[in-house]
Image (tube, grey):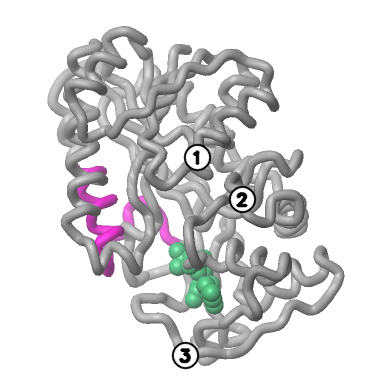
């Protein structure tokens, strides 16, 4: 298929491109490179030996996006582009609404102009908020507890209303749990700007000596060892869920939210232990106060993904830890190296 990929140079975008190109899809990337690097795309080309068009453009620039879409004529769009730092979203809410919600509106206009009615959206389990029950299934109420989650829930709403308004439109809303890991080659991976706010990139920088120690945000949660439990999903599994979703979206009428997780939770201490084992030494850590807005446990019910996409996660935490370390040790300063 001809697939337009917004935010293709990002962490999940770049891994998805490798899988798409590997399956023979034709891809065209739109990325502003505001929080990503063109080097990621160079490495995708190197890994796949496939041609890949890329345009440096902001998704809010509707005229530009429309021109690109009209020229490329995508059969489907995978929409990754957006801002994703929960903490920052509280400080810069309007930027988050503008890029994540406004950018989605702009993209829809460009798709309409190009006659494309098929989209896969990069959503997040953050849309659920505090669990009313666990594991989270797709019917769980959406009550996001931070600005970032609000923007994802709003963009889902926009895409659902758009997809339901006319025939020939489908939107698969992929709700990611906690994506971690890297391509097994160590050539592409997660490259956060500044101090990483997520657990595994932070731990990776402790391992490579960029940071002194991990702060574990709270060990008094109602979980088996007191630290937060999350459903970590290997980025290559997540990438493959997008390829599976392309098959699904082609004949879909309306919108369909689908969780992308494993159904299995690991605590911060378990992730720390798994990563320390791969690195070969106990990585330093301290217990710190809870982080505002964190919940004790977040785990997916992944059954819908199995039923409707024929997809399930294949990689466990050892693969996650090994691949992160392969990426981090070869690229301690990410793509800026
Ligand atoms: N966490 C931690 N120290 C860090 C970063 C995260 O203890 O430096 C914990 C956090 O409290 C949560 C888990 O690790 O329980 C995953 O956090 P992350 O920010 O990676 O993802 P989130 O689930 O918040 O989206």
Q: Is residue 241 above or below residue 123?
A: above
Magenta-highlighted residues:
136-157
Q: Which mark is residue 37?
A: 1
How far apart marks 3 and 2 lie (CA) works out to 29 Å
Residue at image point 61% right, 50% down:
334
Q: Are marks 3 and 2 in contact (CB under 8 Å)?
A: no
- For the residue labelled by badge 3, is the local secondary structure a helix, a strand or a loop? loop
Q: x%, y% of residue 191?
A: 55, 51
Which residue is drawn at the image coordinates 23% and 62% (left, top)? 92
Q: Does the magenta segment cover residue 148?
A: yes
Q: Are marks 1 and 2 in contact (CB under 8 Å)?
A: yes
Q: Is residue 76 visible?
A: yes
Farthest residue to the right: give it. Answer: 280
Residue 289's mark? 3
Q: CA distance from mark 1 to mark 2?
A: 10 Å
Q: Residues within 10 Å of mark 1 (few under 14, many from 20)?
A: some
Counting every numbered tag in the picture gives 3
Q: Nearer the viewer, residue 316 or 6?
A: 6
């Amino acid at each position: 298929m001809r697939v337009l990929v917004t935010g293709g140079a990002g962490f999940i975008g770049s891994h998805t491109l490798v899988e798409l190109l590997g399956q023979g899809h034709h891809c065209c990337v739109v990325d502003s490179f505001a929080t990503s690097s063109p080097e990621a795309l160079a490495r995708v080309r190197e890994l796949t030996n496939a041609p890949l068009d890329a345009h440096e453009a902001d998704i809010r620039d509707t005229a530009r996006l429309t021109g690109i879409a009209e020229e490329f004529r995508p059969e489907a769009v995978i929409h990754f582009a957006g801002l994703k730092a929960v903490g920052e979203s509280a400080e810069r809410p309007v930027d988050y609404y503008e890029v994540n919600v406004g950018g989605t509106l702009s993209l829809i206009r460009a798709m309409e102009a190009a006659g494309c009615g098929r989209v896969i959206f990069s959503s997040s389990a953050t849309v659920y908020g505090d669990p009313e029950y666990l594991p989270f299934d797709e019917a769980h109420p959406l009550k996001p507890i931070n600005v970032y989650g609000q923007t994802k829930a709003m963009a889902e709403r926009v895409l659902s209303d758009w997809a339901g308004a006319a025939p020939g439109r489908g939107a698969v809303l992929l709700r990611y749990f906690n994506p971690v890991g890297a391509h097994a080659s160590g050539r592409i991976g997660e490259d956060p700007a500044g101090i990483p706010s997520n657990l595994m990139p932070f731990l990776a920088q402790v391992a490579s000596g960029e940071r002194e120690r991990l702060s574990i945000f709270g060990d008094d949660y109602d979980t088996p060892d007191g630290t937060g439990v999350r459903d970590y999903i290997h980025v290559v599994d997540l990438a493959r869920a997008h390829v599976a979703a392309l098959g699904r979206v082609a004949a879909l009428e309306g919108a369909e939210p689908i969780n992308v997780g494993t159904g299995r939770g690991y605590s911060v201490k378990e992730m720390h232990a798994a990563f320390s084992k791969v690195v070969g030494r106990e990585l330093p850590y301290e217990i710190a106060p809870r982080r505002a807005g964190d919940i004790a446990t977040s785990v997916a019910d992944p059954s819908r993904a199995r039923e409707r996409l024929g997809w399930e996660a294949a990689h466990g935490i050892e693969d996650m830890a090994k691949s992160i370390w392969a990426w981090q040790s070869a690229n301690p300063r990410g793509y800026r190296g």
